[in-house]
Image (cartoon, grey):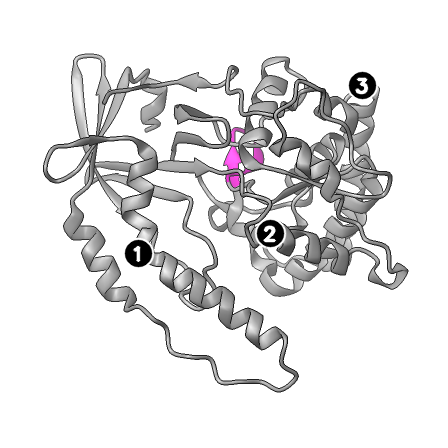
């Protein structure tokens, strides 16, 4: 049952005391106590990276079990109005993260009822240029893509476009380079492209609850993830070809658990670390390298008794076939740029009234 297809009218979020709050406050209340752990992990990694010898990892500054129990005691709730029916959900924090690796606040919260699948509240963020996230993205891009050429691949100047108050159109990164496109900008652009029927959907349908110039708060239904479906070469090839046609690559944060079923296709519900390039060869070779690694690590998710060489052969063929279709229809990396804006403009997304 897909609850959001039943045309909900409004949503509200309440504290245990009955105070109505914005979704931004939901995320603050749930995850602010993790900041001490996040800062601890960042500082620990930095100190270890600058030492040649291995050092013992310090003890975590918080007790995760206590944090989980304290979130449950908060008793945050959400109420969704479906016509004349009001349905109340308990709001749970995401807890299935690696305590020693978490370096940013979780971007989802879960709305639960005993008698139906969960709903997911997402905070799609624009990370500040001063935040550690952007330098990490730049470092990994420069380190991963042909590092022997000693050429910096990350275009910080092109990335700055999403942080400037300007009416100018978005321009591409320099040739053979990539720029970071924040998640809310990706989602807004994709929804406009879907509306023009240029590509099939590669992100789950979601409803906007709230937004500002840099952040989207969205609600979506539960979707089947990669563990529930087989990523055959036809499915994965069509998805990757669609990404390449748009000039997008996800190699910075490629995780199979982010892939999900969307109709007869697969897509990605976690697009917070996407890069854009007009050089599709970069995306092509990096994606194939990643798939080869994942085949060796999690081959069962690609289908039973998968032969890696045969899988890659079929995958290449599917990518080329679908890419040719997009090229014939005029869908390319520069087209995607024409749908991007310098501020968050969710005009093409469906809306749900937020009651305060």
Q: Whole-Å distance between the Cαs marked 1 and 2?
A: 25 Å
Identify the residue at horizontal 81%, vertical 46% (top origin): 282
Q: Is residue 323 visible?
A: yes
Task: Residue 253: give its label.
Answer: 2
**As drawn, 58 above or below 251:** below
Task: Residue 330: give its label.
Answer: 3
- How many numbered marks appear? 3
Mark toward the viewer: 1 or 2: 1
Asked if marks 3 and 1 touch (Cβ < 8 Å), the reply is no
Q: Which residues are magenta?
A: 260-269
**As drawn, 220 above or below 166:** below
**As drawn, 296 above or below 228:** below
Residue 319 is left or right of residue 107, and the answer is right
**As drawn, 68 above or below 337:** below
Task: Name the secondary structure under disc 3.
Answer: loop
Q: Position of residue 2 (x, y in %)?
A: 35, 27
Which quadrant is the C terminus positioned in?
top left
């Amino acid at each position: 049952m897909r609850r959001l297809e039943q045309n909900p009218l409004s949503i509200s979020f309440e504290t245990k005391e009955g105070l109505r709050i914005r979704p931004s406050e939901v995320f603050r209340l749930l995850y602010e106590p993790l900041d001490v752990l996040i800062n601890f992990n960042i500082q620990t990694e930095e100190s270890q990276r600058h030492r040649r010898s291995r050092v013992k990892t310090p003890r975590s500054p918080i007790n995760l079990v206590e944090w989980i129990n304290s979130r449950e005691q908060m008793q945050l709730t959400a109420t969704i109005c479906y016509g004349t029916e009001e349905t109340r959900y308990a709001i749970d924090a995401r807890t299935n993260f690696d305590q020693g690796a978490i370096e940013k606040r979780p971007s989802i919260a879960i709305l639960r009822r005993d008698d139906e699948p969960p709903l997911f509240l997402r905070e799609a963020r624009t990370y500040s240029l001063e935040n550690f996230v952007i330098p990490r993205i730049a470092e990994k891009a420069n380190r991963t893509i042909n590092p022997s050429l000693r050429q910096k691949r990350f275009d910080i100047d092109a990335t700055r476009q999403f942080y400037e108050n300007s009416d100018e159109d978005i321009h591409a990164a320099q040739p053979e380079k990539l720029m970071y496109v924040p998640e809310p900008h990706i989602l807004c652009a994709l929804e406009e492209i879907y509306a023009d029927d240029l590509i099939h959907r590669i992100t789950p349908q979601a409803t906007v609850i709230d937004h500002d110039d840099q952040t989207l708060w969205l609600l979506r239904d539960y979707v089947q993830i990669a563990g529930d479906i087989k990523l055959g070469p036809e499915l994965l090839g069509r998805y990757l070809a669609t990404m390449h046609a748009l000039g997008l690559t996800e190699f910075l944060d490629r995780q199979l658990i982010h892939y999900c079923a969307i109709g007869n296709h697969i897509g990605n519900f976690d697009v917070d670390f996407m890069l854009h390039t007009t050089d599709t060869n970069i995306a092509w070779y990096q994606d194939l390298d990643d798939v080869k690694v994942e085949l060796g690590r999690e081959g069962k998710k690609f289908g039973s008794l998968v032969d890696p060489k045969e899988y890659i052969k079929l995958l290449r063929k599917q990518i080329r076939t679908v890419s040719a279709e997009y090229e014939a229809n005029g869908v390319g990396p520069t087209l995607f740029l024409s749908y991007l804006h310098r501020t968050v403009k969710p005009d093409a997304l469906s809306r749900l009234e937020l009651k305060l």
